[in-house]
Each structure stands twice: as C-alpha cells, then as structure tokens.
Amino acid sequence: MNATARVTPPLDEVKGLTTPSLLLDEARMLQNSQRLRRHLDGLGVALRPHLKTVKSVDAARRLLTGGDGPAAVSTLKEAEEFAKAGVRDILYAVGIGPAKLPRVLEIRRSGCDLTIILDSLEQARAVAQASRDSGDAIPVLIEIDSDGHRSGLDPDSPDLVGIGRVLEEGGAQLRGVMTHAGESYHAVGPEALTRFAERERDAAVAAALTLRDAGLSTPVVSVGSTPTAHFARDLSGVTEVRAGVYPFFDLVMAGIGVCGLDDIAISVLTAVIGHQQEQGWIMIDAGWMALSRDRGTASQAVDQGYGVVCDINGEVIPDLIVTATSQEHGVISLREGSSAKLPELPIGTLLRILPNHACATASQFDQYEVIPVGPGGMQQWPRFRGW
Amino acid sequence: MNATARVTPPLDEVKGLTTPSLLLDEARMLQNSQRLRRHLDGLGVALRPHLKTVKSVDAARRLLTGGDGPAAVSTLKEAEEFAKAGVRDILYAVGIGPAKLPRVLEIRRSGCDLTIILDSLEQARAVAQASRDSGDAIPVLIEIDSDGHRSGLDPDSPDLVGIGRVLEEGGAQLRGVMTHAGESYHAVGPEALTRFAERERDAAVAAALTLRDAGLSTPVVSVGSTPTAHFARDLSGVTEVRAGVYPFFDLVMAGIGVCGLDDIAISVLTAVIGHQQEQGWIMIDAGWMALSRDRGTASQAVDQGYGVVCDINGEVIPDLIVTATSQEHGVISLREGSSAKLPELPIGTLLRILPNHACATASQFDQYEVIPVGPGGMQQWPRFRGW
C-alpha cells in the first residue's frame, strides 16, 4: 500500500552511521499516520496520538493535529517534555499515584490542560483533596476495563458512580471515561479486531451512560489501541481514539494483520561482525541492547525471533531472522524449516532489522536517524526517556 | 552471607524518589565485588571487571583495581567514557567491525591501551591494515569458542595460527586469546559450573599453546563469565578473568546458585497504583520500560516472572512476583500454585522489585539512586548508554 511512499535511503549517509543506529523512514511514518487519520475521519472521531512510542518532539509535531493537538502520554516526563514543546492538551494514561499529583499540578500551572486517569475511590479522594488544596479542579477520566487486560473498573461496577461523585463533589473535574483494549494485540485478522473494537466501544459508552444517568457530566468517551483503532467500523458514542504504535508499526502488528512488513517505519541498522559457518550463524553488532528483549511474535503464528533481517535498502531477505541475542551480539540465521540458502554476508555488511515491538526497540536509542521525506540529507531527531 | 552488610535505606529519602527509580545498595555491591576478588586472588589470577553491567564511572571507581585498573567493555561508547575517566587498560570484548577501527585508534591516541578481539582472517587483515596505516600496532586477542555459545574460533581451528601470523606480520599486535563461556548461564549448581569453568580454561589455554608452539607471542589468556568466575577451582594457564554482572547479581544468577536473593544489589522502586481484586492483581507503576523485557528466569526451575517483589526495606514478600508488564504498568500477583494470601498493599505503597537480569534492568535508567555504605544521604550516580 505504500510503494509510492518508498524513499531511497541516502546510502552514503547511512553507511557513515555508527552501528547499531535507529533508522526512521519519515515517508512511511507519515503514510501510516494519514491512514489512521483518514479512517477515523470517516468514523467522525478525533485521534489522540499516544506519544509513548515516539518520545520525540520532532515526531510529535508531525503526528499531532495542527502540530500541537491532543496527545496521550505514559509518563509525567513525557507530559513535561511535550508541554514544554507547546502541546496544550495531554492525557496521562496510566492510573495516577497520589505522590505524582504535585507534578501534575505543576504541569497544569505551566498552561497545559493535563488530564489524569484512575479507577478507585481511594485515588478519587486523593485527587479531590489535591484539587481543593491547590484550587485547581484536576480533570479526570475514569478508567474502564473492557477486556480483563489490566487496570480499570468493570463498566457495571457499583463504584463507578461513587467515584464520579467523589470527584465532582470533592473539587476535581470528572471529564469522562477511557478504556484500552490491550488484549486486542492477541486477536488476529479484521473480523476479530472489529469485534474487539466493538467490545471496547460498548464498555466505554455503557460506563458513560451510567454516569450521565446519575446526573454526572461525562463529555469525553476515549477508547483505543492500535489494532482496534484501525478496525473499528462504528464508534457511535465515542469522542476520541488513542493509538500509539501506528506511526511506526512493527512485527507484532504485522503478525495480527494490522499492517504489512512494508509499512514498518523503523529499523535497526547493524553490521556483520562474524560468522559461525558450521552453525549457519551470522553475527551482528545489534544485540538485545539495541533490539530490546521484546519477543512479542513468540506467541504468534510466525515467530520472528528478535527481528526480520533486511538489506540496507530495507528489502526483506527471505527467511532470515535474528534468532538469538546477547547484550551487544545478535545471531542471524535462517528460520527453522527454511529451505533457503544462507546468503553470503561478508564482515562489515550493513543490514536493517525490523523490530518485534517498536515502542521497546525505539526506547533503546537516544535519537532517530531519519530518512526524510523531503529533499536534503538525513536528520537526527532526539528521543528522551525516563520518568 | 551478607547480613552484616545490610544498610537500612534512608527511608525518608527513598520515599521522596520518583517512581520508578533504580536503587543500588552500595554495601551489597562492595561485598559482591570483594567476594569475587578474594576467590580469584586465591587462584592467583587477575580480575578484569566487565563494565557493561554498571555503565557508571562512580561504580567503576569502586570495582576496578586501584580505581582505574583493567576493565572490559561491550561498546566503544563505554570505552570512550571510561578512558575519559582515566581507565588506561580496556578490552573491547565484542568482535571488531572494520568501520569501528578509526574510533579504536582515536581512543588509543587518547592514552588508553584499548585491546580489541576478532575471530576471522578477514578481520585480522583489516586490523593489520589499520595498524600499518596509523603506525599504531593495535593489540588483539583472538576470540575462542569454548561452548558453542556465539562467536569465536574452535581452539583447534586451522585458522588460529594464520590469524596470529596476519596480525603479527601485518603490523598489528597479537596479545593473546580470550573466551566467554556464555552457556554457563544455563548450568546449575557448583559441580556443573566448575565443569564449565574447566572447559572455558581448557579451550583458552589450548589455543594459547597452539599459538606459542607456532612461535607467536601470546601473553594474555583471558576467560570469564560471572558463573564460571565464581566456581573455577584451578585456573592454571589463565592470566585474567572477566565478569560483568557479579557486583549487582540478579535473579538469573540466584537461580543457578551463584548468589542468594540477599546478595542482589539493585532493585526497582515502584508504587502501587491500583488493584483488580477479583483477579488477585496489584498494579504498580513499573512496567517493562523500567524492569526490561528480560525473562531470563522463564527457563529456570523457578520462574520469577518479571521480578521478585520486596517491601521498601528490601525484604522479599513470600510468593509475590511481577507476573505481567505493559510499557508502564506491572501486574503483581501470587506465584502460581501459592497458598499464601495476597497482602494488602494500598495505593501508594512503595515496593522494590529484584530484576531477572541486572544488565537489562539497569540499562533502562539514567542514574542509580544509591543507598551508600558510608554516612550521609543517598547519592546519585549517573549511567550512560548508547554506542
């Protein structure tokens, strides 16, 4: 679907990079972003990109509505960095710990409309107290559990309305509900993913109706995961969709049918540093420190090891995957059962590895080496990390 | 074995840390370091700490002989950082890629005696060429494969002497041989680990003898992994032992009997952020971004999930482990089959998680929060990363 977007990497510049490096194909990233925007525009729902994947102001500018539009984050460090860069509407989408409330208030004082989430009376009381103490009515989405994945209240939990009341009557601001169908990462194919999207929507909309029936204002109904965002067919009642990994995609998303290998926008540049011919192994200088320990495809129909091997132009080399890693060593070999011939890749050959999980692999690097969509040479986009 | 070394953490300071944070118990680190030094002193062999685990100048000062003695590293970035900090004898213990030779020469020009490793004629020719071109005879250890783990020449490979000749006659400097018994991580108990240490020694010593018989000077015989370093009983013919994870230890090392849980010097401080009572889950704000995706104990007799849960003082809570992670969420629950009762841990409770793999978990953080052995408050020791 993105053959037209393929940009030939500036080979001389790629060859000058340290290995391992993290390559980002901007054209693919923009095309992935446009694909999801078009889909959600068609459903009449806003997109709130989850910036935990990119952790980069340069990438965020290209993904957010108007360059500074609504965003979600997974850490207060991200909230601080993106607020500083001018993003004015941020959802911190991890259940709030009371010790983090002073930083939340500080970010809000800087002019950013930061919203938090919670799923217990205990947290609601702490947030109400912090709101009263500071004179700032902290906006809150109540987290709903739509699939037994991790956090959140059951949509018919008796605590739901109680939490809403503690917030509203206690001095905070109930802004709505949110859910994340994390289990959708284990569903495969359009039908299964569409059913997951319905389940996610139904849970969030049901919870919002319960709150509204109790007289509690619930303007926001926020849902989303990359798989459900792409396969939702009807989002009636939903006001916004969150997704994180969609601008980059990865082998896990390809394995469940959300994208193709040609859509994956990041790869790890690595060099061949050795051979164990009798074993059929080619050694590279990208180990788990570069690729991450993520083995997300291990439970999928096709196990991609620690990543799929491409040549320097990003063309997949048939049946070649990273089968083992140490801290700074990767072992490339043919997929088990393959009848392909191990290619001759002399010492120094540059390769690109497609990652299992873009969030995990990107987090191992401090910057993207960007193959830009426009004219001019490669760009460096810094990443940040930490909490 | 280190009950005497236990230092009560300065609780007020720990409570003021952001969660997640990386705690380091300096007393345990020093005790672990002394344990290995004593053992190797008894065998009459030098220790070359592998600094890939700590990636910290402050930690290195406490681990190296005289504070700046011999070290091993896994990246040229580490070599650059430690050379800048005054370390004058560094082994870059990953097979050299020819594109990295200009940086090797640059580090050597800065006054650091940097040695590299290789296992092919192709690499030897490139190193000889770079040595001639620069007028600097780059010192080299030939990597030997003692256990089929990853890189290295078979000790009786016909290429061994050829590589030595290419180096010596080509203008580089053959300094010796090295091997790493990485498969020892899968051996369990003193007998099996001692046998691995013998195998590691035998392979390296045999290769050195072959080179010497061919008239090639081979002063250095370098072996090591944390498991074999601790269980070697006779290292005749070996001149130095490398080990990396020993100052911190981790659950993988505890699982094969190299240390006890009480020896593990690093832990991730985290806070409770939610509960799913029906599931028996306690949610924490340390996910895989903090703990890493490493599941090194998954193949051991006792699978510790993503880590063992301790209270804020570092006392293990029976049968409680991190059973699942998302990027910034961890799920704590009782070990499968446990008859223990899930403890009541209210929102905000601080816990410490012992890691599967210290190298991987530490690499997720930019600094250590150090519980110091001496008087005074906590210290921050910066870590670096990258290549």
Image (cartoon, coloured by chain):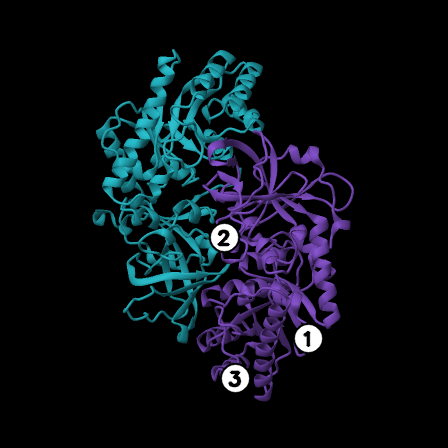
Chain colours: A purple, B cyan
Counting other residues with Cα less than 10 Å from the Cα at mark 1, is it few (<14), some (14-19), or many (20 or more)?
some
- Judged from this view, the residue extending furthest toward the front is A339
| Residue B88 is at least partly visible in this image | no
Determine whether the residue tagged by mark 1 lies in a helix, strand or loop. loop
- The Cα–Cα distance between marks 3 and 2, rounded to whole angstroms, is 40 Å
- The Cα–Cα distance between marks 3 and 1, rounded to whole angstroms, is 26 Å
Chain letter for the residue marked with disc 1 in the picture: A
Chain letter for the residue marked with disc 2 in the picture: A
Residue at image point 61% right, 82% down = A217
Name the residue nearer the viewer: B3 or A19. Answer: A19
Which residue position holds label 1? A234
Earlier sequence position, callout 3 versus callout 1: 3
Q: Nearer the viewer, mark 3 or mark 1?
A: 1
| Residue B340 is at least partly visible in this image | yes
Which residue position holds label 3? A161
Which residue position holds label 2? A295
Earlier sequence position, callout 3 versus callout 2: 3
Q: Which quadrant of the figure has residue B143?
A: top left
Pointer 1 and pointer 2 on the same chain: yes
* x and y percentages locating residue A216 in the rendered image: 59, 84
In this rendering, the answer to whether B171 lies above or below A363 is above
Determine whether the residue tagged by mark 3 lies in a helix, strand or loop. helix
Residue at image point 33% right, 71% down = B344
Label drawn at residue A183: none
Give the residue type that dot 1 points to. Answer: Asp
Give the residue type that dot 2 points to. Answer: Arg
